[in-house]
Amino acid sequence: MSKALYIVVAASAGALLGAGLMVARGVSAGRPAPAGPALAAAPAARATLLDEVLARIRSDYVDGLPATELDRAAAAGMVSSLDPHSAFLDAAQYQAMRASTAGHYSGIGIEVAERDGHVVVVTPIAGSPAAVAGLRAGDVLLAVDGVPVAAGTLDDALGRLRGRTGSTVRLEVGRAGEPGPLRFEIERSDVHVNTVAAERLPGAYGYLRVAHFNDATPQDLRLALSELQAEGALRGLVLDLRGNPGGVLESAVSVADDFLDSGVIVRAEGRAAGARFALEATEGDLLRSAPLVVLVDRGSASGAEIVAGALRDHGRATLMGERTFGKGSVQTVIPLRDGQALKLTTSRYYTPSGDSLHERGLDPDVRLGDALGSGVVAPGAPAGADPAVQAAAQYLRDRGLGRQVALAEQP
């Protein structure tokens, strides 16, 4: 049976929470009541603290502020007080979040970061317009379409880099060893963000790394796994989830499903009807029951913990590395007016065994010391050079002699 993509329907949560907050603006006073029979006066609605604060800001703050700006600030402050994972998203933030979870976007295909007061190219995505044009890791972004790129303008620069497919963008970059700025004119295209890396390890073992979970991750993982298997059957697989912060819940569940034949993958509990659900595996283990090691560390969170917890609880995988981060909550993104959105914690999730990972995380079956668990290798080096991957592959080889022998071999 083919594997199905699970979709969490959060319509109930959206209907209940998407209505937003209505703030009373005050009532007129002093007008005489119309003639007629005497009626008992309705009690005046008591102003809330929020009403009082808004009124004081409007009347007394040194600068006049538009009501819409105050509304947004009140909404953002209210949501930020709930938990670290809930947030009010303005239109630009919502658009950026949608692009990051979709797995593709219209742009030039570079990863950038702010370093030492500069916006620097981390890497051009292989095959992207940026890579074809000759941009390199380490290039400093100086201007986009003539607008200077300065410290603190990373979000603005990202917005300018993205645009309609077929349109062009002009870049000025600084490069070590070059006497002056380099200029590029690059045509935007649809860029696929691949979150999966694969490598064949010695002895007929495989390695898959999932950086985070977006909508395209399950398809990318299946393609990468099939390419590894095309070179010959795998005797085992190392699934690397170190530093994986999570992402799209349905994608994480689908990845776990790819290595399970049956059973619950994750349960969630929340107040809204749509926030309570249990997702189960479908028949078909793509690894054909070959042994599996999952590498985790303190940066493995949320969706990564769902995958690791489900595979371990069903006896399908051995966890190696460090205790995971411990993010045991699910956020629902609820569209609001004017292209804005609310990212709201609506559920807490539980592993198949019923454990909550919230602020606790998962303890590995085999703990790796700092020297092995760091995952730091030279840039461009194969995954097989990583000491943690070497330890996981050795565990898989020893597993052929029996699980207890494999465990005994670990420090």
Image (cartoon, rainbow, N blue to C red):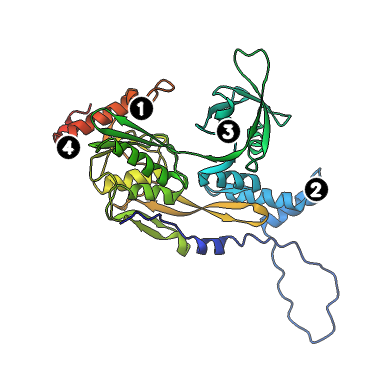
Above or below, 211 against 390 in this view is: below
For marks 2 and 4, give the one nearer the viewer. Answer: 4
Position of residue 142 measured from the top left corner of the image (x, y, whole percent) = 67, 25
Displayed quadrant of residue 7: bottom left
Give the residue at mark 4: 403
For marks 2 and 3, give the one nearer the viewer. Answer: 3
Residue type at mark 2: give it. Asp
Sequence-first tag of 1 and 4: 1
Residue type at mark 1: give it. Ala
Left or right, 219 with respect to 334, comes to: left
Left or right, 181 with respect to 334, comes to: right
Q: Nearer the viewer, residue 304 or 203?
A: 203
Q: Secondary structure at mark 2?
A: helix
Above or below, 352 against 299 in this view is: below
Give the residue at mark 2: 60
Sequence-first tag of 3 and 4: 3
Give the residue at mark 1: 383
Mark 3 nearby-residue class (10 Å; few <14, some 14–19, many ≥20)? many
Give the residue at mark 3: 129
